[in-house]
Image: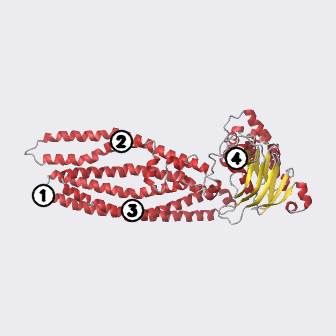
């Protein structure tokens, strides 16, 4: 079985530190190099107290020391300051490459996983929340990485250096320094649980806001058409207020944590000053060492305080790891690996006692459905909304798999097939045509792996009744159509979708209410294009307008997930059953 993105990244949301380390796989050598250069560039901060203490000790003893004795020390100070330029540049380069690689890799894996997740997952998971994970949560990982390197690692180096130097020169003072550590541990443990919980609450609200924002932007034409701008704004203001409230609570707790840490350590700093002053007064240590020890203690305090300050940011990063793991570790994947690829399709599709029930539903959407569709046959499905027509189409495409029974393609069980390869032989023309903001050419040739000749492209446009309106556009086939094809009419968008289907020369066609949203003239043009599209191909049509399916080989009337009538248009009208009643309603 092919490894999932979570496997490839060795992603485990319950082990954030290990996961973050694994995300830098392939860049560990750069990280080590970055850490070495970081230590070198930061060395002036640690060494300066030692040099200052030496200078003070020299000038405080003029009887035995010469002023020239400070010159070597000043030279070393200048050197360690100048080397910061080169080492900082190298640190930035190595760390930036590592971090940007990680960021890109995680986003690439998220996108790959999104493409593999089942349609059921996408039905339940709002697209706005997905946007938030790909953009905001990955950015949080990047920020956490910077905080770990530039704050946490820096703090650990400072504390280690100060403790090491002090321990070699005055173990008593070093023991006083060590007293700071348990205080920091107690503070961190006390606040960790509460900050983590409030981070989760805040992230959840932001994801909900992102999802609702996406819906709001898509609904703007509907909102304007119904004059409900104020109500929509009021609903969004409510969500914004909830995010603000959660954010304020998180900020207050984080800042209280930081303030508590700072006050505690300042009290310790005053204690350190008293002890070192007492030792210097009694000539137990040189006067210059008082300055050095006080600087080291402040360095330790700043280091510990930096560690405590960075903790809220780390908590956000850990929450982002958990959030991304919801996608990367989701088991709801369409499993195609190891299954039989589909090299060719004749178009014989057989439903054998198929039942399908949506997750969380008590009633089946499709009940014990059986139908044998021959190659090249056109079968139309009609019935009231909720009767199971679109669910049947999703079963044919492979977006859903039967709960019971089997679907056979050319006498082979579709459950044993790689459905990705099967879909290369089908075309879908939905009611709401999905176009993107490229050119007409881009939209027609979308996803094709082979080069398309101008003759093939023109033939597809001709058969889709699209040549005339495309020729009137400013740049013809190279005209950009705007987001979702906003610069085209509904009928024009449908004809572009039909041209997209035609150029693939599919063996199976799915038409899901392809003309229901069009006016009479546009419907006539699209209907002629559809007739050319379905010629000689196995076709499934979902339709509400019964006039559009007169030429179907068979019509299946659906009711509550089951076929109640099957026959030609003339046969069903003659029987004066359910189809006849539906037709009378449209007269």
Q: Which residue is mark 1?
A: 281
- CA gap between label 1 and label 2 equals 41 Å
| Callouts 1 and 3 close, C-beta under 8 Å | no
Mark 4 sits on what residue?
487
Between marks 1 and 3, how big is the CA–CA gap?
Answer: 39 Å
Q: State the image coordinates of residue 243 (x, y, percent, origin top left).
A: 51, 63
For the residue carrying disc 4, how many other residues have a C-alpha within 10 Å: few (<14), some (14-19), or many (20+)? some
What residue is rendered at 59% in x and 59% in y?
Answer: 212
Q: Secondary structure at mark 3?
A: helix
Which of the two discs, 1 and 4, labels the residue nearer the N terminus?
1
The Cα atoms of the two marked residues, 2 and 4, are separated by 51 Å
In this view, the residue in front, 22 or 522, is 22
Pick whichever of labels 4 and 3 is earlier in the sequence: 3
Toward the right, the furthest residue is 574
Q: How far separated are the C-alphas under marks 2 and 3?
A: 30 Å
- Cα separation between marks 4 and 3: 51 Å
**Residue 41 falls left or right of residue 94:** left
> Which quarter of the image is occupied by the C terminus?
bottom right
Label 4 or label 3, whichever lies nearer to me, is 3
Tell which residue pokes out farthest to the left in this image: 63
Task: State the image coordinates of residue 350 (x, y, percent, origin top left).
Answer: 77, 51
Lower position in the chain sequence, tag 2 or tag 4: 2
From the viewer's perspective, is residue 351 above or below residue 74? Answer: below
Q: Which residue is mark 3?
A: 255
Residue at screen point 78% across, 40% down = 468
Q: State the SS at label 2.
A: helix
């Amino acid at each position: 079985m092919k490894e999932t993105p979570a496997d490839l990244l060795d992603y485990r949301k319950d082990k954030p530190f290990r996961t973050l380390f694994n995300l830098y796989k392939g860049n560990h050598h750069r990280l080590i190099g970055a850490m070495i250069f970081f230590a070198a560039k930061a060395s002036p901060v640690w060494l300066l107290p030692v040099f200052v203490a030496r200078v003070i000790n020299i000038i405080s003893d003029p009887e035995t020391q010469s002023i020239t004795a400070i010159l070597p020390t000043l030279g070393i100070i200048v050197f360690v300051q100048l080397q910061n330029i080169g080492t900082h540049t190298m640190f930035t380069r190595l760390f930036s490459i590592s971090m940007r690689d990680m960021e890109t890799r995680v986003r690439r894996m998220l996108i790959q996983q999104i493409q593999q997740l089942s349609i059921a997952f996408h039905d339940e998971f709002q697209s706005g929340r997905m946007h938030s994970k790909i953009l905001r949560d990955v950015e949080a990982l990047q920020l956490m990485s910077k905080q770990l390197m530039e704050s946490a690692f820096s703090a650990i180096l400072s504390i280690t250096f100060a403790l090491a130097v002090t321990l070699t020169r005055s173990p008593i003072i070093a023991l006083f320094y060590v007293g700071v550590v348990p205080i920091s541990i107690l503070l961190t443990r006390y606040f960790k649980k509460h900050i983590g919980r409030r981070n989760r609450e805040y992230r959840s609200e932001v994801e909900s806001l992102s999802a609702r924002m996406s819906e709001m932007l898509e609904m703007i034409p509907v909102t304007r058409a119904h004059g409900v701008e104020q109500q929509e704004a009021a609903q969004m203001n409510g969500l914004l207020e909830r995010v603000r409230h959660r954010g304020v609570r998180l900020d207050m707790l984080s800042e209280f944590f930081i303030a508590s840490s700072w006050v505690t350590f300042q009290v310790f700093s005053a204690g350190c000053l008293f002890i070192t002053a007492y030792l210097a007064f009694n000539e137990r240590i040189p006067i210059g060492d008082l300055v050095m020890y006080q600087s080291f203690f402040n360095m330790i305090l700043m280091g510990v305080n930096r560690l405590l300050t960075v903790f809220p940011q780390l908590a956000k990063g850990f929450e982002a790891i958990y959030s991304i793991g919801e996608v990367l570790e989701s088991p709801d994947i369409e499993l195609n690996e190891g299954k039989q690829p589909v090299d060719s399709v004749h178009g014989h599709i057989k439903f054998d006692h198929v039942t399908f029930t949506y997750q969380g539903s008590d009633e089946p959407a499709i009940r014990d459905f059986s139908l044998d569709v021959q190659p090249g046959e056109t079968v139309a499905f009609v019935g009231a909304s909720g009767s199971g027509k679109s669910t049947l189409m999703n079963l044919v495409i492979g977006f859903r798999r039967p709960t019971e029974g089997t679907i056979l393609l050319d006498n082979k069980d579709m459950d044993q097939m790689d459905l990705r390869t099967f879909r290369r032989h089908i075309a879908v023309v939905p009611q709401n045509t999905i176009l993107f903001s490229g050119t007409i050419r881009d939209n027609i040739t979308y996803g094709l792996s082979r080069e398309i000749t101008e003759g093939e492209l023109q033939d597809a446009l001709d058969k889709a009744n699209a040549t005339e309106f495309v020729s009137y556009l400013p740049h013809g086939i190279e005209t950009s159509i705007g987001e979702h094809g906003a610069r085209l009419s509904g009928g024009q968008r449908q004809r572009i979708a039909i041209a997209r289907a035609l150029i693939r020369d599919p063996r199976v066609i799915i038409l899901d209410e392809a003309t229901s949203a069009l006016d009479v003239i546009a419907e006539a043009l699209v209907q002629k294009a559809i007739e050319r599209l379905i010629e000689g191909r196995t076709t499934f049509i979902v339709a509400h307008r019964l006039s559009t399916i007169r030429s179907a080989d068979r019509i299946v009337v659906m009711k509550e997930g089951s076929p109640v009538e099957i026959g030609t248009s003339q046969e069903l009208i003659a029987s004066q059953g359910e189809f006849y009643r539906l037709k009378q309603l449209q007269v």
